[in-house]
Image (cartoon, rainbow, N blue to C red):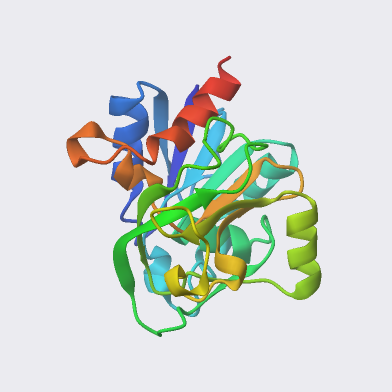
Amino acid sequence: MKFGVVVFPGSNCDQDTIHLLGSVLNQKVVTLWHKDHDLQNVDFVILPGGFSFGDYLRSGAIARFSPIMQEVVQFAQKGGYVMGICNGFQILSEASLVPGALLHNESRKFICKKIYLKPQTTNTLITSALDLEKPLQIPIAHGEGNYFADADTLKMLNDNDQVLFRYCDGQGNISAEVNPNGSVENIAGVCNKERNVFGMMPHPERASDPLLGNEDGAGIFESILNTVLA
C-alpha cells in the first residue's frame, strides 16, 4: 500500500508518521509538499499534526488553501482515503471534508498529555480491528482540540455511526470529568458520511512503535492494512 504524507510549513509530526509507515509497518510512503499538485498515485493520504502556517488566523485555515489541498479534496470526493491527525483534523474541518469544527480548548491552554480513547465503531477503515471495550492510551498535544458541532450535525453523526472515538478514563467510562478540552459529547474523532475521510485529535503515530513503550495506536494503522490488503 502506498501512503502520502502531506508536509505544510509548520508540520512537526510528518517524520513520526513517515517513520511509522515506512520503517515500522514496511509500507511505501512518499512526502507530498504543500505546493505540489501531484499525489503521486498514493492509495491513502495523511495530513499530519503540527502548526501549519503557525496556526495564524485559525488552525488549519491557511493550510486548507495550499495547492496540494485541491488534489486532496478531489481525491476524497472520488472515494480516496484521507486521514487527518490533530492539525490535520483541523485542516479537514476547514476544508469541509469532515463535519464540525475545532475550537480553542475550554481551558484556553495548550494541553500535552496522555489520555484514553474509547473506539465507538468498527464500521470504518481505521477502526475495523479495534476492540470497542478496550480503551486506548494515546497522547494529545493541541490548543484547539475542542470539537464542536450543532445539534443537527450531532444527530447525523450519531445516527450514521460517524463518531470514531470518545475521550474516556482507563476503564472506558465516558464522562465530562475526563474530557480534556471540552469537546461536545467527548468526541475525539469523526469520519465523513461516505466513510473514507477520517479526523482525530489524538496522535496514534506517537503510540505505535515498540521503542516508545506504547503500541495502543498501532491498531488504528493495522485496521487500515488488514482491511485494504486482506
- Nearest to the observer: residue 72 or residue 148: 148
Residue drawn at point x = 46 percent, y = 28 percent: 222
Query: Whole-percent x and y of residue 101?
Result: 61, 70
Q: Examine the image and state in which quarter residue 93 appears.
A: bottom right
Decide which of 166, 156 is in the foreground and name it: 166
Q: Position of residue 182 (x, y in %)?
A: 51, 76
Image side of residue 143 versus residue 119, left or right: left
Q: Nearer the viewer, residue 90 or 33?
A: 90
Circle count: 0
Taking 133 as reference, is 14 left or right? left
Q: Quadrant of residue 196?
A: top right
- Point 41% across, 64% down: residue: 52
Residue displayed at 68% across by 71% down: 149
Q: Position of residue 102 (x, y in %)?
A: 55, 71
Residue 18, image x and y in percent? 34, 37
Please give the name of the residue rendered at 45% of the width and 61% of the height, measured from the top-left corner.
Answer: 87
The quarter of the displayed image where residue 181 is located:
bottom left
| Figure quadrant of the C terminus | top right
Q: Is residue 82 above or below residue 96?
A: above
Residue lying farthest to the top in this orientation: 230
The residue positioned farthest toward the left in the image shown: 211
